[in-house]
Image (cartoon, rainbow, N blue to C red):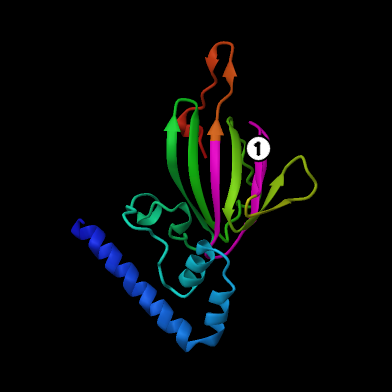
């Protein structure tokens, strides 16, 4: 085993030991742990107490904030949004967008030339389309397609740990080839 993997393993064992000690000292936490029905719930419960026990043996660091897990990125400051391009090729772009208590500026509308499919991986958000009287409320797992030129704005996103979006942008094929939007027009 490489030294880095050994250190990762020892750190996880130490985190588990500290979490177990805390569950023995706090009956409410122990009850919450016994109510967990799957590994992911245990990982989230531990994370809520500051322990990082989710990485499995040999998992490397990489994307979002030094971790391959898309849900473990660092939350941007309140009122802001961060974006990371995960994949890009001719005609499409996949982004991870992390919003924290963010909203579009008053009077601002996105009016993009590309198609967008977006889903919420974490949190909730309110999206307003210019052609609809009421904003749409989105929660974890909800998705929608936004056609090119359909004006929309972000009304609100969750406070920390924020709203986490996965957005796929693409350009329609025409009879003359790909309708491509230059990078300068991306949001």
Residue closer to the observer: 140 or 151: 140
Residue, far top: 176
Instruction: Report x, y in % for residue 132.
Output: 78, 43
* Placement of the N terminus among the 4 image quadrants: bottom left
Please state if 28 lies on the left or on the right of 106 as rendered. left
Please state if 102 lies on the left or on the right of 19 as rendered. right
Instruction: Report x, y in % for residue 2.
Output: 20, 56
Magenta residue span: 142-168
Please state if 43 lies on the left or on the right of 151 as rendered. left
Position of 49 relative to 28 (above/below): above
Q: Secondary structure at mark 1?
A: strand
Residue closer to the observer: 141 or 150: 141
Dot 1 crowding, Cα within 10 Å, few <14, some 14–19, many 20+: few
Instruction: State yes or no: residue 187 in magenta.
Output: no
Residue closer to the observer: 62 or 172: 62
Instruction: Report x, y in % for residue 119.
Output: 60, 46
Position of 102 relative to 112 (above/below): below
Instruction: State yes or no: residue 156 in magenta.
Output: yes
> What residue is shown at x 55% (from left), y 42% (from top)?
167
> What residue is shown at x 51% (from left), y 49% (from top)?
97
Instruction: Report x, y in % for residue 102.
Output: 57, 57
Residue pointed to by mark 1: 145
Position of 179 relative to 16 (above/below): above
Please state if 45 lies on the left or on the right of 131 as rendered. left
Residue, far right: 133
């Amino acid at each position: 085993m490489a030294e880095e993997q050994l250190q990762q393993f020892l750190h996880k064992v130490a985190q588990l030991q500290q979490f177990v000690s805390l569950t023995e000292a706090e009956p409410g936490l122990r009850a919450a742990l016994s109510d967990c029905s799957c590994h992911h719930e245990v990982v989230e419960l531990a994370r809520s107490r500051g322990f990082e026990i989710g990485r499995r043996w040999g998992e490397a660091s990489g994307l979002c904030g030094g971790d391959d897990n898309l849900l473990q990125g660092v939350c941007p400051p309140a009122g802001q949004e961060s974006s990371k391009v995960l994949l890009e090729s001719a005609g499409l772009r996949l982004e991870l967008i992390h919003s924290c208590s963010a909203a579009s500026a008053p009077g601002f509308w996105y009016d993009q030339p590309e198609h967008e499919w977006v889903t919420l991986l974490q949190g909730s958000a309110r999206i307003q389309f210019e052609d609809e009287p009421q904003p749409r409320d989105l929660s974890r797992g909800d998705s929608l397609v936004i056609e090119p030129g359909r004006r929309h704005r972000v009304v609100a996103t969750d406070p920390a740990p924020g709203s986490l979006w996965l957005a796929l942008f693409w350009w329609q094929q025409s009879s003359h080839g790909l309708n491509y939007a230059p990078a300068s027009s991306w949001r």
